Image (cartoon, rainbow, N blue to C red):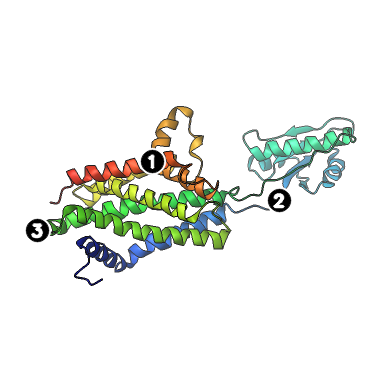
Amino acid sequence: MSRRALHPLGHLVLARIRMFYRQPEAVFWTYGFPLVMITALGLAFREEPKTTILVDVVGPQAEAFQTRLAKDSRFKVVRPAESDWKKRLQSGKTNLVVETGASPTEPPQFWDEPRRADSLFAREAVENVLLHELVPERPAIAEKHLDEVGSRYIDFLLPGMIGMNLMGGGMWGIGFVVVDMRVRKLLKRLLATPMRRSDFLLSVMLARLIFTLFDMIFLITFGYLAFGVRCSGSLLELSLVMAIGGTSFAGIGLLVASRAQTIDAISGLMNLIMLPMWIASGVFFSAERFPEVFQPIVQALPLTCLNNALRGVMLDGDSIVTQWRPLLALVAWGVVSFTVSLRIFRWK
């Protein structure tokens, strides 16, 4: 197809793509920064080796009690000075302190930190060892550990990062660009051309969607190669979910930029809209952690809908039919936002 035969919308999209790749800093923030962030978080929350239980033993029978616990490889037993064990427990250098009695028959005292889960776990583990010594014939309980796809934190994190980048690409990548063009009087010049307004707005959205989808492919490939994150569902359906999410946030970004007159104004509006979703929409932790009274609001947020659909396809192997509720909500957000922005968009 010749350039002359290409639809005006196509020319506008190509122009936006060329402008984007002439800005190295924009390329880095779109493609490089998400990789840096997912690498840092993936390393910080990587799988830990087998848990070691730190126990301090003090008192007259400390040596004998240390010998009893040393039979279990889970325990790392330390015999600190009598004046140090409280500080060690407070600072987290040990999980539990066992204060032994004056004689072997006197029961020990346990000192734990009830606000720390590892301290309570250590107390339970030591109690089980002592109980097994008292009742050696009790049946052993078999332990099985879940090690399936999607059970690690990085498996939970990657879909949230994809959703967050789709939101950032749609909001900042469109809202900021449009307002910048308005400030530099470029929109006023475009208004004097025979270009249709809807073609311009669609070109900004489509160009940004192309950049963002390439970014998502980058992230998914990197997550698989670096951390072994797999997609349990269909890659085609996952791509469709990302396209719907990217289009929805592109419409929201366009709506926010429709009336903003300065860079400061659009920056404030973007942060006002995005910050609650960063916190509440389940990017770094589950949105279910919020109280039940807030759940209707949390679940209605567009980023929550997108993250739920992404995790449903990637982790649970769901189809888009199963995830129709969050996807329908995303479509509604996008259609309403784009329709309103067409009506209220200010060119001057």
The residue where tag 2 is placed is: 50
Do the numbered discs 3 and 1 sit on residues whose CB atoms are within 8 Å? no
Q: Residue most toward the bottom?
A: 2
Q: What residue type is labelled 3?
A: Ala
How would you rate the neighbour count of disc 2 (Cα within 10 Å): few for under 14, some for 14-19, many for 20 or more? few
The residue where tag 3 is placed is: 192
Task: Please indicate whether residue 169 sits to the left or right of residue 160 in the image.
Answer: left
Looking at the rendering, in which quadrant would you find the N terminus?
bottom left
For residue 59, say whether it is visible. no
Q: Which amino acid does label 2 sit on?
A: Lys
Q: Which of marks 1 and 2 is nearer the N terminus?
A: 2
Residue 118 lies, with reference to residue 296, above or below; the image says below
Q: In which quarter of the image is residue 332?
A: top left
For residue 202, say whether it is visible. yes
Q: Determine the secondary structure under disc 2.
A: loop
Label 3 vs label 2, nearer the camera: 3
Do the numbered discs 1 and 2 sit on residues whose CB atoms are within 8 Å? no
Residue 113 lies, with reference to residue 196, above or below; the image says above
CA distance for labels 3 and 1: 37 Å
Label 1 vs label 2, nearer the camera: 1
Label 3 vs label 1, nearer the camera: 1
Task: Please indicate whether residue 43 sits to the left or right of residue 185 in the image.
Answer: right
Q: Determine the secondary structure under disc 1.
A: helix
How would you rate the neighbour count of disc 1 (Cα within 10 Å): few for under 14, some for 14-19, many for 20 or more? few
Q: Nearer the viewer, residue 173 or 327?
A: 327
The label number, if any, that marks residue 328 in the structure image? 1
Image position, residue 278 (x, y; %): 41, 44
CA distance for labels 3 and 2: 68 Å
Q: Nearer the viewer, residue 179 or 190?
A: 190
Q: What residue type is labelled 1?
A: Leu
